[in-house]
Amino acid sequence: MFELPDIRRRSLAALISVFLLFSACSSDRSDGTGDTTYGRKPKSEPQASDVQAGAERPVDAETLPYAEVDEELVYGHFAFPSDMVEPLPAIIVVHDWWGLNDDIRDAASRLAAAGYMVLAVDLYSGETVKSVEAARNKMISVVENPDDVEANLRQALEFVSIAGAPKKAMLGWGFGGGWSLNSTMLFPNDVDAAVIFYGQVSTDEDRLRTINAPVLGFFGARDRGIKVESVQEFEEAMQRLRKDLTLQIYKDVGHAFADPARSNYHSENAEDAWQRTIEFLTANLSTADPS
């Protein structure tokens, strides 16, 4: 049987060590304009890892194998700041029911630009879908095999641990938001924070009791799939268990309000949720000595 852990270790070790070598060698170099280069490809060479204008830091990204499920390699999008000089806290990004598409890669790079190592996982075996019917069918087929998803996400957390991440968070949208929460229950000792964008929640207190990490959730009051009543029941269950939960329910939006490709997109609330997410991650993934 193909031993993926060795492949993951070699891939990550090579990526991180080579990158850090370039960073160290070029930290004292300048192109004469005052800009410091950090081993990146020339700007004249297009790269998917470049971040949109306004991002805090430039980002590099690679497609790497991070898991083996049913004896098949699973590839994810691994992004990190181009000026990284040592391993950073990591975020596991879980896609919505469309699959690991360019929107998810862009979001992963945006998180990396904020100062994190980010692994966007793939629960669809390399497939992406565009129609609602195809997305629903694909999601159902995955949900019917939860053991595969659990193995996928467990190995994703192992992957960023191998990369040296001192702390780890889960973050997902819709279908992925539900799995972000599930991961805090499945791997309570491996997840330091979780963010849910309009994902399925639970009121099963036996399962919720296992959560050790702070959770941040964003929902729309007009969501017809994840009804606000179920979110409020989730909140009440978490309060009874004295869990660390912060909820933001936007009153005038429905499902997928943070997805720019959807008709429900609400730019103001989406940006507010993003800023709250960054603040939450900063507070809970910081490795700085509080003293």
Image (cartoon, grey):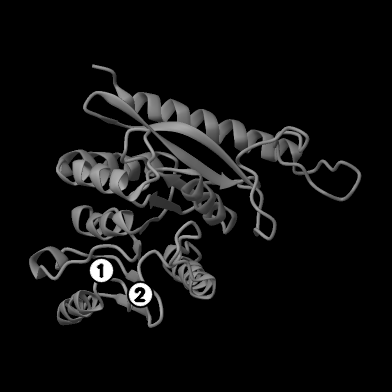
Drawn side of residue 140 relative to residue 42, left or right:
left
Kind of residue at disc 2: Gly
- Please say if 193 is above or below 269: above
Q: Where is residue 103 shown, x and y percent of the image?
A: 50, 50
Q: Nearer the viewer, residue 199 or 1?
A: 199
Q: Secondary structure at mark 1?
A: loop
Identity of the residue furthest to the top in this view: 1
The N terminus, quarter of image: top left
Q: Quadrant of residue 182?
A: bottom left
Q: Which mark is on residue 226?
A: 1
The percent position of residue 185, horizontal first and vertical second, equals 20, 58
Q: Position of residue 37 (x, y in %)?
A: 76, 42
Q: Is residue 187 above or below residue 274?
A: above
Question: Of residues 250 and 50, which is closer to you in this image?
Answer: 250
**Disc 1 crowd, CA 10 A, few/some/many (<14, 14-19, 20+):** some
38 relative to 8 in the view: left or right: right
